[in-house]
Image (spheres, rainbow, N blue to C red):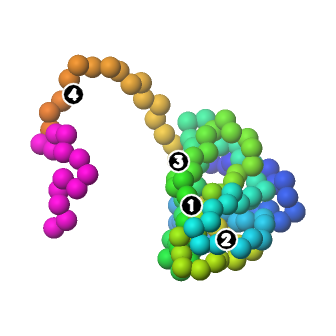
Amino acid sequence: MKIPTKITHRNAVLPERQYPDDAGSDLRSIETRVLGVMERHLFHTGIHLEIPEGHCGMVIPRSGFAAEHGVTVLNAPGLIDADFRGEVLVNLINLGHGPVKIQAGDRIAQLVVIRYERPAFVNVLELSKTRRGEASHGSTGTR
C-alpha cells in the first residue's frame, strides 16, 4: 500500500519505520517546545495524508519516549479518518517528573494504518448469553 503524503513545512519528513518489520512509522515534530509537567500541546508534523478508504490511521505513543520521559499521546490512539486531509497533529502530554524539551525533528509518536470494518448496529431485545455475562472492570481479579 502506498499512502500519498503532502509535506507542508521545510522541517517535515515522511513517516518512517526504524526496522523493516515495524508496524508503526515514526512521526516527527516540526517545532521546538518545552513541555512542562502535566502540560499538553498539539505538536505539528507538517504532513497531510491520503489514507485509503476502508483504512484509518492511529497515532500511538512511542514506548521509549513514554518510559524515559513520561510523555505520551493524550488521546491515544488518535484517530485519522480516511477522508481527513488536514495536517497530522500529535496531542502530547507530559506525565513525567520534570519538563521535557522536544525539538524539531524529534520522533514524538507512531502512526499505524489499519483496515477496519463498518458494522451496522442493530437494536435487539436480548443478547446471547456468555459465561462472563455483564461482569465488568476487574471481574476476573488480579491473580
Q: State if disc 1 and disc 2 touch (CB < 8 Å).
A: no
Position of 82 with respect to 127 (left or right) is: right
Position of 6 with respect to 140 (left or right) is: right
Q: State if disc 1 and disc 4 touch (CB < 8 Å).
A: no
Q: State if disc 3 and disc 2 touch (CB < 8 Å).
A: no
Camera-nearest residue between 34 and 4: 34
Give the percent coordinates (x, y) of residue 7.
81, 54
How many angstroms separate mark 2 from mark 1 (CA)?
Answer: 13 Å
Q: Amino acid at mark 2?
A: Leu
Q: Nearer the viewer, mark 3 or mark 1?
A: 1
Indicate which disc, 4 or 2, sits on the residue closer to the N terminus: 2
Residue on which disc 1 sits: 73
Q: Nearer the viewer, mark 2 or mark 1?
A: 2
Indicate which disc, 3 or 1, sits on the residue closer to the N terminus: 1
Query: What numbered label is drawn on residue 35?
Result: 2
Q: Nearer the viewer, mark 2 or mark 3?
A: 2
Q: Residue at x 55, y 58 (%)?
A: 74
Would you call the spot at circle 4 few (<14 residues within 10 Å), some (14-19), or many (20 or more)? few
Q: Is residue 113 visible?
A: no
Q: Which residues are magenta?
A: 131-143
Task: Tell me which corner region of the image, top left, top right, bottom left or bottom right, holds residue 90.
Answer: bottom right
103 within the magenta span = no
Q: Nearer the viewer, mark 4 or mark 1?
A: 1
134 within the magenta span = yes
Q: Amino acid at mark 1?
A: Val
Q: Amino acid at mark 4?
A: Leu
Would you call the spot at circle 3 few (<14 residues within 10 Å), some (14-19), or many (20 or more)? few
Q: Residue at x 16, y 67 (%)?
A: 143
How many angstroms separate mark 4 from mark 2 (CA)?
Answer: 47 Å
Element type at marker 2?
strand
How many angstroms separate mark 4 from mark 1 (CA)?
Answer: 35 Å
Residue on which disc 3 sits: 114
